[in-house]
Amino acid sequence: MKSANLESRLAALAAAGGTITYGELARELGVRMSELTSQLEALMEEDAANGHPFRAALLRQRLSDDHLPAPGFFLKAQELDHDISDPGAFVAEHRRRLRSA
């Protein structure tokens, strides 16, 4: 998968104020879930290094009533020294910053 495809899709989602499930995004991009998650983790590292909000915050679990990303998102965020003690507020802030960019 080309990272540019993922990045442009996430930029479009942010501009539209939307979210997407991991499965939907993997199908749209024609990639396996493992490849998608690897690319998302790489984007999170890039975003953290540049002081940007996590673009991966635009993803949500399919069966989640709270529309939060998968647990791996929070593990990666914590690994990157972010406080995830309030997951809902953490994601809401990143989504807000992405949509106002």
Image: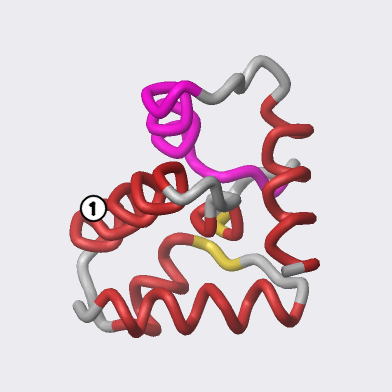
Q: Quadrant of residue 19?
A: bottom right
Residue 91, image x, y percentages: 68, 41
Please state which of residues 72 and 44 is positioned toward the viewer in this rendering.
44
Q: Nearer the viewer, residue 16 or 27?
A: 16
As rendered, which of 26 and 43 lies closer to the eye? 43
53 vs 6, left or right, is: right
Q: Is residue 38 left or right of residue 10?
A: left
Residue sitting at the far top: 85
Residue placed at 43% from the left, 73% from the top? 25
Q: Position of residue 61 (x, y in %)?
A: 55, 49
Q: Quadrant of the N terminus?
A: bottom left
Tell me the quadrant of the picture where the C terminus can be found.
bottom right
Q: Residue at x 19, y 61 (%)?
A: 35
Residue drawn at point x = 23 percent, y = 53 percent: 38
Locate residue 33 relative to residue 81 in the image: left or right.
left
Q: Of helix, strand and loop, which one carries label 1?
A: helix
User: Total number of numbered labels?
Assistant: 1
Against 92, is 82 above or below?
above
- When the figure is inspected, residue 86 is found, relative to residue 98, above or below; the finding is above
Compared to 21, does 10 lie above or below? below
Q: Amino acid at mark 1?
A: Ser
Highlighted range, magenta: 67-81
For the stretch drawn in magenta, the main secondary structure is helix
Disc 1 target residue: 38
Q: Residues within 10 Å of mark 1 (few under 14, many from 20)?
A: few
Identity of the residue drawn at 63% across and 76% down: 13
